Amino acid sequence: MALAAKLAGVSIKDIRKNNERDVAHRNGIKTNCLRILTVGNDCSLGKIVASLKLARALQKKGHYAKFVATGQTGILIEGDGIPIDTVVGDYIKGAAERLILQNQHHDILIVEGQGSIVHPRYSSVTLGLLHGSMPHGMIMCYEVGREFVHNMPGINIPPMETVIKLFEEIVNVMFPSKVIGFALNSKNVSELEAEKERRRIKKQFGLPACDVVRHGPDELLEAIIDYKKEVIPY
């Protein structure tokens, strides 16, 4: 591949390479930039899609919003970011904090989440993003009908109320935050089943919920805008 690139006069860049070697410092974090992190009860269920849809919808509404990429696909789409899952463990929180510091001239940041705090393999990256980005609020993403951890058959995903409680307790150690809505991934069910699940999750938790592809992101968009007025009233 390297030879082919050289002959063609093009360069190859490994976007997973990084030089992150700084810990978190908790200095210089602005109070007037809303930070929203997409989280999930598993990996590979649509956090990047939800993040992009919400960021783009906010921009179309005239908000100075930014999609903050933390994975290689997001970096390719947005043109910047940090591949957080390749950062050395001690520096994950510092890398997440640097993403905030670099982008907090925006009014709203939608930070792409990774993994899950209840995932047997990837919880450490999730924890680093939670403590490093210090989100004001979280959007909980999940796939309708998924019962087992992705690529780990037989390992059950905990109940949603357990997952939410864990996320909120863990992030609140560093910064006050809560789940403010749900982004459903309903690709494997019918429209009728998706709507039934949407009504169920909204009734159970009293929070807005939608599939940002099937239903559009408007319900979560409104939740973010309203929440910004609540936590950043000026």
Image: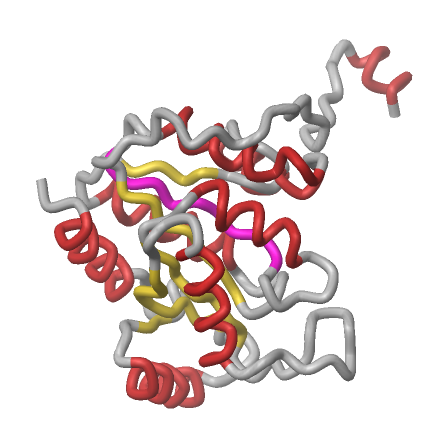
In this picture, is 155 found above or below 60? below
- Which residue corresponds to the image point at 47% horizontal and 66% vertical from the top-left? 141
Q: Position of residue 218 (x, y in %)?
A: 25, 61
The image's colouring method is secondary structure
Among the 4 quarters of the image, the one containing residue 108 = top left
Q: Residue furthest right?
A: 3
Can you say which quadrant of the picture contains the C terminus? top left
> Measuring 44% from the left and 45% from the top, which residue is drawn there?
111
Query: In what quadrant of the picture does the N terminus appear?
Result: top right
Identify which residue, 2 or 156, lies in the foreground.
156
Give yes or no for residue 44 being in the magenta stretch.
no
Q: Which residues are magenta?
A: 107-115
In magenta segment, residue 110: yes
Q: Residue at x 51, y 28 (%)?
A: 80
Name the one closer to the observer, 213 or 135: 135
Q: How many marks?
A: 0
Image position of 144 (left or right of 83): left
Q: Residue at x 44, y 64 (%)?
A: 169
Outermost residue toward the left?
Answer: 234
Position in image of residue 2 (x %, y %): 87, 20
Instruction: Examine the image and state in which quarter residue 134 appears.
Output: top left
Question: Left or right of 64: which side holds 147?
Answer: right
| Rendered image quadrant of residue 28 | top left
Q: Residue furthest front?
A: 173
- Judge whether 62 appears above or below 217 on screen: above
Q: Position of residue 120 (x, y in %)?
A: 72, 66
Picture coordinates of residue 201, whole percent (x, y): 37, 83
